[in-house]
Amino acid sequence: MASCIIEGIYAASKSTGDMRLLQSAKLVAGLGMAGDRYAEHCGTYTIVKEPGRQLTLISADAVEAATAAHPEPLEPVRIGNLRRNVVLRGVTCHELNSCVGRKVQIGACVLFVHRLCVPCMYNEMKNGCEGLRDALWYATGVNCEVLAGGDIHVGDRVNLGLEWDPDLSRVNDGGKPQGFYVHPKKRSAQEAKANKGMPAEVGQKLALKDPEGEILCLREPWRPLFF
């Protein structure tokens, strides 16, 4: 049974808010983490109807390994500033990413992993760390739906469910374009074009929802630079 532990828990009350470090939190089925922006329907991407927006997991081991493997030194980044909810210790990048389509259990809480949570350029710029997006592309965790809620605590053991076959028919990533999960430097011309920007109608809603600057725009005020 593949397992690891919770090393940190983070939440932000709004889309542009700082991530607060917590010792415990309550997960609510169908919503996410109580007090976090996505459970409160005020996250930047709340308007994008996608069950995996409810909660994010990230591996501290994966971030450290990817940072160390990058050919050029990176500025140190506090893992909470990567804006994921639950930080795990004792799981590799490959193991966590392999949870897509599987149920993950933390005590009485059950999560379903829908997709990889790849980094955006905004996060790189917010952290002032050039090269962060490219270095951590596959190491910034996964997006989850909360199937069964309950309390979680730092130190809790997490069962990754890798002993079971994934149910990929249940995965709902919100209709991401072709090549969305491919590293930007490895995309084909067609994939790069498909991921150049969000649909205008979605981007416009995002810009209106988050005028404080969570969305970094490129060329047009409603086309966020999102990777």
Image (spheres, rainbow, N blue to C red):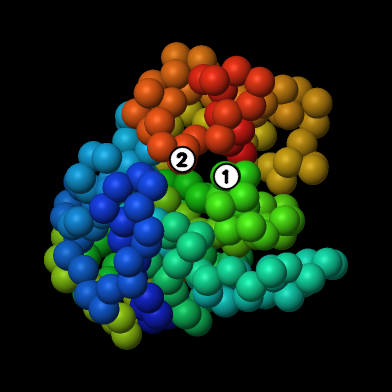
Q: Are marks 1 and 2 in contact (CB under 8 Å)?
A: yes
The residue shown at (71%, 46%) is: 183
Expressed as whole percent of the image width and height from the top left, the position of residue 99 reads: 47, 59
Quarter placement of the C terminus: top right
The residue labelled by disc 1 is 122
Left or right of 203 in this view: 180: right
Note whether residue 104 is visible: no
- Label ID, residue 214: 2
- Label ID, residue 90: none
Residue lying farthest right?
Answer: 71
Give the secondary structure at mark 2: loop
Left or right of 227 in this view: 57: left
The count of marks equals: 2
Give the secondary structure at mark 1: helix
Using the image as rendered, state which of residue 224 and residue 106 is in the foreground: 224
Quarter placement of the N terminus: bottom left
Using the image as rendered, state which of residue 202 and residue 19 is in the foreground: 19
Expressed as whole percent of the image width and height from the top left, the position of residue 9 reads: 33, 70
Query: Which of pointers 1 and 2 lies earlier in the amino acid sequence?
Result: 1
